[in-house]
Image (tube, rainbow, N blue to C red):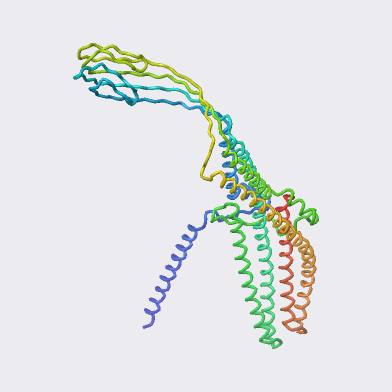
Amino acid sequence: MLTPFFGELEALRTDYAGMFRRWFLIRLLLASCVLPVNATPLVLSLDQALERGLDASLALKQAETSQEASEAAVGISRSMFMPKLDVVGLASWAQVGSSIGFISNLPTIGDLNFDLNSKGYALIQNSFGNIGLALSYPLVDFERGPLLEAAKALDQAAEARVMEQKRQSRFSITTAYLQLQLADALIPVWADSIDLSTNLLKDAEALLEGGLGARIDVFQARALLSTDRSGLSSARSTRAIAASALARLLDLPAEQRLEASDPLESFPPWPLNLEASVGAATRNRPALDVIRQAQIAAEAKVKAAQGSRLPRIGVLLGGGINGDSLKVPVLNGSSSISNVPVVGEVNLPNAESSGSVSGSFYDYGIMLNLRQSLFDGGLSTQSTALARSQVEEQRLLLKQREQLIIQAVESFWHINQSAAIAMKASRDAEIATEEAVRDAQLRYRAGIAPITELLLVKRDRQAARSAAAVAVQQWNFSRAGLELQTGLR
């Protein structure tokens, strides 16, 4: 009775097994299709990251673009000292019908006199065109010189801003790389701590099963293992964030993984004392040069605003050729036309008739012009006041920036000195805690020391190893900060 039932059950089990295999293969195929294109990590040293980052820095490219704009502004200011040559031209056509003998102010023609009787009528058509050259040059302009000086100062400020941005980009890349190195160094600390916690839990469980341990030892070991696992997860998350920050500075695609090839090792000692470091930072800092050049530009703008109230003298030279064609398709009356442009007077038949005349002439001349502003609504006065306020603003900003740089140098220098002591102390502590952990493990396994003692020395070792990595990172970070402020390497 049960044989058919078990046969059906076996067939059903076989079908489910086949379905599971097919489902697993499909999921594996889909997983292989959605793997990121750049699954292979990009491994870079610090020097490689700096080289790549300085080439790809968006902030640096923006500063260089601003410098190009300032160079164009200098060119615009220089153009104020150059003559201007223009081609000028005019073309017109007009038609007038009149029954009077005199026509005045006719557009493009001027005045015409016709000898018409009381019933006379004339239809006039005129075509006029001219083309020539006009050369203008400002002989005296007290505003253009200061404007050129201001443009040059702003160009030098833009150049200094590029140099400052190179320092800032280098410091940002170095700092991000150090953060990645620190995260890489802390992950093995937590991994080793997990190994020790796992062995400790096994020892506690074995002692409890053998009747030589207490349940509280097992619970404490489990709690410690959970804490270490949480710490490792946090360290891995920190490493991913640090790698992402560095990748953004290098302008890498979002799917590109990044790894640091250089281990966390201390940089060479800083060669200058505090006083020499402060002196180097205040003497050779592009950020201060940016403000100084902006102050020079503001002072030049004061002169430009004052120069706008002084007279300007310019010269204009022009010359060209002109052509005119006058047609009278319909004329009833006398037969003479006077004051015709180009040819003077035209004789026409006395009866109804038509006539035309055409000719050309050339002209040239020179003109001097003088312009003196008497009242501009207070524009020059307010422009001068604005430029003077900018001079004072830049002076105060320069003083403020100098104080901030001095403070930054002192902070980095003291952090560097403190990190040197911390590195030595943490190395000594790391060596001592390693021995303490080994001794506590032996004592605990021998049953002559409680688990609490082992837990304490284990925490001390973890803290010492973490402190050693942080001390090296702080030493390198402070040295990178001193390089930023002084420009030395």
Q: Nearer the viewer, residue 157 or 249?
A: 157
Extreme residue toward the left, this view? 119
In the depicted structure, whether residue 201 falls above or below residue 314? below
Task: Tell whether 77 sits left or right of 125.
Answer: right
Task: Point out the image quarter for the N terminus.
Answer: bottom left
Q: Nearer the viewer, residue 404 or 180?
A: 404
Extreme residue toward the bottom, this view? 211
Q: Is residue 49 visible?
A: no
**Place of residue 262 in the rendered image (x, y in percent of width and height, measured from the top left):** 69, 56
In the depicted structure, whether residue 288 falls above or below residue 108? below
In the depicted structure, whether residue 319 falls above or below residue 53? above
Query: Which residue is found at the position 69% from the left and 57% from the top?
Result: 404
In the depicted structure, whether residue 410 falls above or below residue 312? below
Picture quadrant where residue 331 is located: top left
**Place of residue 484 in the rendered image (x, y in percent of width and height, measured from the top left):** 70, 53
Q: How many marks?
A: 0
Extreme residue toward the front, this view? 118
Q: Nearer the viewer, residue 424 or 208?
A: 424
Task: Tell whether 285 sits left or right of 348.
Answer: right
Task: Tell whether 47 sits left or right of 331.
Answer: right
**Place of residue 254 in the rendered image (x, y in percent of width and height, measured from the top left):** 54, 56
**Place of residue 251 in the rendered image (x, y in percent of width and height, measured from the top left):** 57, 52
Q: Is residue 144 visible?
A: yes
Query: Which residue is found at the position 66% from the left and 53% from the top?
Result: 397
Q: Nearer the viewer, residue 396 or 241?
A: 396
